Amino acid sequence: MNIEKIKSDFPLLSRKVNGKQLVYLDSAATSQKPKQVISAITNYYENHNANVHRGVHKLSEEATEAYEGSRKKIADFVNAKANEMIFTRNATEGINLVAQSLGFRKGDEIVSSVMEHHSNIVPWQMLKSRGVTTRFADIDEDGILKMDDYENLITKKTKLIAVTHVSNVLGTINNVKKIAKIAHDAGALLLVDAAQSVPHMPVDVRNIEADFLVFSGHKMLGPTGIGCLYGRSELLDAMPPFMGGGDMIKDVKLEGTIYNDVPYKFEAGTPHIAGAVGLGAAVDYLVKIGMKNVHEHEKKLVNFATTELQITETYGNAPENGGIVAFNVHGLHSHDVASMLDENGIAVRSGHHCAQPLMKRLGIVSAARASFYVYNDEEDITKLSASLKDIINLLKRKKVV
Ligand SMILES: Cc1ncc(COP(=O)(O)O)c(C=O)c1O
């Protein structure tokens, strides 16, 4: 991978922050966008903009072709079929769609984990009012999910296991294929939160045997406001729609409505057409680099960062890490660390990372997080560790005074 060349595709990465060259280490929150994605969106609005699936005029045909072409491209990217790929606003909406439409009933059980982002906890907790119980698998001292917990927590009443493929804090890559087997052996389904995996490594929904899988476009070089829910056809066919309105119907009478086929049944109203087009261009960009190369590149960066950040306290020690390192500087709140780094033009995330139960499990209130992507290199990490060393030395001097 030619990182210099890749970097030059991202206009924002050339800007300065606080007078310093920007070092962007917050891609797990949202990635930057290459010019290829930005121009695909501009080109759509300048040359093809119209509503989809409605008009017979030329522009509407072109817009529909662009929208459905992107769906096919994105489906191929994770080895799904186009009609198994529903466009949503983001990963969060995909999880909520399954929570609301899968038909959870009183007495049903769900197994989530302490490692999850709030998006993979709260939608399940919201089913409590329907009499649904959610239990949580634990992690071990290395930040790896305890497989025994899944075996122990799963019962005949378990309808679904919901698990993140890659932790947005620890970086742990979970063995979701193994969790799929545990779920299926017990007659339950598996939902994989792939918000941090699809952007960073090859993901094959069939190989991991996911029943549902969600991800967000904005974390994979695409625009905000577009995401995807993959679902097995027979499950999606049997599920009622999440929202009603235009485009999700075959026939509407005042007495009742016949719903459209999947995926349209789940896409009520005018969709984010330009968003889908942008995400299609992002997939083209990633395919060109090759997802194996992306993963290998980030593995190297994580190994390098883990050594460089020995000067801090880091969290998680899984053998497989998806390009994320969370850390704390002893004696400082993570927001203070992130603000001091920002003065040097270095952007890292700080806070609880929408994973408060995980923070509690780790015995901390917050952490700083460096996350890597295709445009990062070892120099970015060296700049981060040099700034952290300065911060630590400053703290020491203060203590002496
Ligand atoms: C593991 C994980 N799941 C879900 C989400 C939610 O993504 P979004 O806000 O795009 O829906 C995130 C976002 O950080 C995440 O890291």
Image: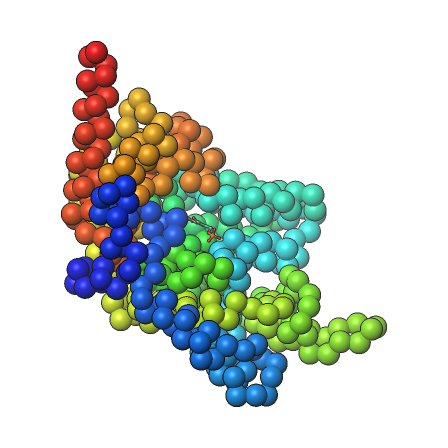
Query: Is residue 377 depicted above or below 144 in this figure?
Result: below
Residue in front for this viewpoint, 92 or 262: 92
Say which of 237 and 394 sits in front: 394
Please count the marks in the image.
0
Could you tell me residue 292's position as x and y percent? 25, 63
The answer to whether residue 329 is left or right of residue 167 is: left
- At x 26% / y 71%, what residue is drawn? 288
What's the residue at 42%, 29% (across, down)? 365
Q: Quadrant of the N terminus?
A: bottom left
Does residue 115 appear left or right of residue 299 in this picture? Answer: right
Image quadrant of residue 305?
Answer: top left
Given residues 29 and 59, the one toward you in this image is: 59
* Image spot of residue 9 (x, y percent): 26, 64
Residue 236 visible in the current orientation = yes
Q: In this view, does 227 lie above or below 326?
A: below
Of residues 240 and 174, the one drawn nearer to the viewer in this rendering:
240
- In this view, which residue lies farthest toward the right? 255
- Report the quarter where the C terminus lies: top left
Note whether residue 189 is visible: no
Q: Position of residue 78 (x, y in %)?
A: 39, 67
**Res 330 quadrant in image:** top left
Q: Position of residue 69 (x, y in %)?
A: 44, 78
